[in-house]
Image (cartoon, rainbow, N blue to C red):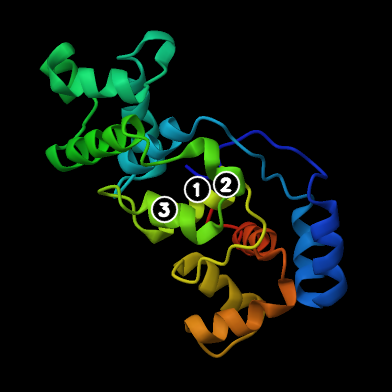
Amino acid sequence: MWFEQPAEKDKWSKATRHLKRVDPVMKSIIARVGPCTLSPRRDYFVVLCKSIFSQQLNTTVAATLFGRFRDLFPRRRPTPLLVLKALSGSVDEQAIRHTGLSRQKRSYILDLAQHFMDGEIPTRSFAGMEDEQIIEHLTRVKGIGRWTAEMFLMFVLNREDLLPVDDLGLVESMRVHYSLPRRPNKEDAIALAQLWRPYRTVATWYLWRGNVGKRK
């Protein structure tokens, strides 16, 4: 789901120039993939809802089920207040079941909505917060772990220097493109990525995109 966003070409030209200058492997990947199309988003709550819906589901099924969920709300726009009301009895239970929302994921969505309602996810303050501060707030929500929080920082807030070392696709791409004998552990991945600072997010995006046929 994280790659589902409109393209914004050449926004990252400064980052790609840096990566091509310091790393010949990255230069080759960039030449093949083309401009980085990461673009910021503002629909924070909707994106996080969908991330919970998508857990343990393939992309197509997740999109279908979340589409049904959005259909429950005016203008297909679930808000924290409307979600709390819907999942607490204002929407027919059969309609909710039609979305495929499990009992566990339902509790996660309710917890997310309550965190937004209580101001415990201070979206208006995100611009002035460090990455780790935002991750700390997000991972207080049931069903949101560090990986999901890192994806949010990269794909929604477009923070420039994230390196999600727990992502299997990233370390496998490192192994392939840098001809490593095995997938790098966290320490080795961090060391390899030092060259990319302060644009490790963009380098990670290119490594994902460079793994054609392995990760969309």
Q: Nearer the viewer, residue 79 or 101?
A: 79
Residue 184 horizontal/vertical position (percent): 52, 84
Give the labeled residue for mark 2: 155
**Residue at (55%, 90%) from the top-left corner?**
181
Q: Quadrant of residue 190?
A: bottom right
**Residue at (38%, 36%) from the top-left corner?**
50
**Which residue type carries mark 3?**
Thr
Give the labeled residue for mark 1: 152
Q: Are marks 2 and 1 in contact (CB under 8 Å)?
A: yes
Spatial CA distance of label 1 from label 3 is: 6 Å
Q: Secondary structure at mark 2?
A: helix
Residue 185 horizontal/vertical position (percent): 47, 84
Q: Are marks 1 and 3 in contact (CB under 8 Å)?
A: yes
Give the labeled residue for mark 3: 148
First of labels 2, 3 by sequence position = 3
**Residue at (44%, 53%) from the top-left corner?**
149
Q: Are marks 2 and 3 in contact (CB under 8 Å)?
A: no
**Which residue type carries mark 2?**
Phe
